[in-house]
Image (cartoon, rainbow, N blue to C red):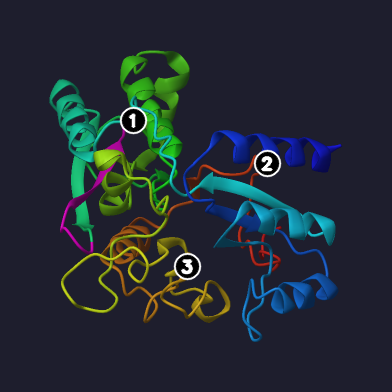
Amino acid sequence: MVFAAFYSYLRQWKRNNSIRDEVVIRIFPQSKLQMDQLRQMKFISNDEYLPDYGEVNGRFKDVLSLYRKGIPAAVVEEVHQSNVDSTYRAYDDILREIDSLAELHPELLRVQDIGKSQFHNKPIRAVKISGNVKRVEDEPAVLFMAGQHAREPLGIDVCMGIIRYLMDHNQQKKVRRWLDNMAIWVVPCLNPDGYDYVLSEGRKFPWWRKNLRDNNENGIFEPKVDGVDLNRNYDFNWGNGGRDEIRSWYYRGAAPGSEGETRALMKLAERERFALAVDYHGFGEVVMYPWALEMTPPDA
């Protein structure tokens, strides 16, 4: 039934759409046999392995070929179609709102720039919220963060909503208990360069995921070869996640913590020693626990 609906959509698309047939495909191999089939179909290289899923640029006909072989796949986005909702705001607007909230609630909210973005040197902003925010107290710290992947703006809105909620309801008994007993940190957008790239000028390619690292060091941002997947750049288990190829959506970077954005968060985490951290993304209705590498966490 799913295949029939997709095939019907494909025929309709071919009738109505004159732009090039190029899409981002997310593939979910279920077995070694399917991995071998993906290699034969040239979706992945002979030495590449997908532990959970992978994304490639392809055509609608490629998705049909995958379905026929029983390999689960989904069209993530039509490469030449922009669908970034106009309600998502530029990063500078988000910073202005944070600064405004800090002015209104100086006793509860403190702003700190924890680092710079890799390409444009934009400030990466962290917000600390606590009942006596100017003091360093012996209380557990928690972190809410988002925006590691440029194309996932919804988590940024969630983080801003958390900040607004705590400020708007800071006299409620429940909220007051949180503020008096915890240090609540929020990093709304870890990847400001990538986020603004997605929003600016109605960008239609390549539905950007990474930061804007200049991989070939020619001083020009080129989406086909540049950028690092920040979520694959951390030092823990660095060699077992992501890809080595700079063109990959999952390029892990030249070394662990090579990116300014990643280093900023690592330093904050090392300093605050968070008891809990929640990282919001924007694809798949799942809750993933450490570590999402099919490894069992010690406190499972």
Residue 16, x across and y down, in percent: 56, 33
Q: Nearer the viewer, mark 2 or mark 1?
A: 2
> In what element is the residue under mark 1?
loop
Q: Is residue 38 above or below residue 223?
A: below
Q: The residue under label 3 is which amino acid type? A: Arg
Q: Please tell me the numbered disc located at residue 232.
A: 3
Q: The residue under label 1 is which amino acid type? A: Tyr
Tell me which label, 2 or 1, sits earlier in the chain. 2
Residue 18, x across and y down, in percent: 49, 41
Q: Nearer the viewer, mark 3 or mark 1?
A: 1
Q: Considering the image in quadrants, where does the C terminus appear?
A: bottom right
Q: Please tell me the numbered disc located at residue 252.
A: none
Marks 2 and 1, how far apart at CA = 30 Å
Marks 3 and 1, how far apart at CA = 25 Å
Residue 11, x across and y down, in percent: 69, 39
Residue 260, x across and y down, in percent: 26, 66
Q: Residues within 10 Å of mark 3 (few under 14, many from 20)?
A: many
The part of the chain drawn in magenta is 118-130
**Residue ID for mark 2:** 10
Tell me which label, 2 or 3, sits earlier in the chain. 2
Q: Is residue 287 above or below residue 243?
A: above
Q: Nearer the viewer, mark 2 or mark 3?
A: 2
> In what element is the residue under mark 2?
helix
Res. 186 image quadrant: top left
Looking at the image, can residue 296 be seen?
A: yes
> In what element is the residue under mark 3?
helix
Q: Considering the image in quadrants, where does the N terminus appear?
A: top right
**Residue ID for mark 1:** 88
Q: The residue under label 2 is which amino acid type? A: Leu
